[in-house]
Amino acid sequence: MKQIYDVILQDGHLDDYFQRCLKEHNQS
């Protein structure tokens, strides 16, 4: 799982998408 997450972090677009999802999830 960490390998996949590291690859996602290397992609700014996917990282931004992940951050938005996490923020929305935390707010609700």
Image: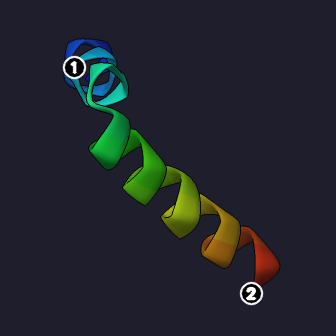
Q: Nearer the viewer, residue 12 or 24?
A: 12
Residue 18 position in % (x across, y down): 43, 53
Q: Residue at x 29, y 46 (%)?
A: 14
Q: Residue at x 37, y 25 (%)?
A: 9
Residue 7 is left or right of residue 25, and the answer is: left
Q: What is the residue that sits farthest to the right in this orientation?
A: 27
Query: What mark, if any, has residue 15 been given in the picture?
Result: none
Q: Residue at x 22, y 20 (%)?
A: 7
Quadrant of the rendering where the N terminus is positioned: top left
Query: What mark, if any, has residue 7 been given in the picture?
Result: 1
Residue 19 position in % (x across, y down): 55, 52
- Name the amino acid, label 2: Ser
Q: Mark 2 falls on what kind of element?
A: loop
**Pointer 1 local density, CA inside 10 Å: few below 14, some 14–19, many at least 20:** few
Residue 4 is left or right of residue 2, and the answer is: left
Which residue is the site of mark 2?
28
Residue 24 position in % (x across, y down): 64, 77
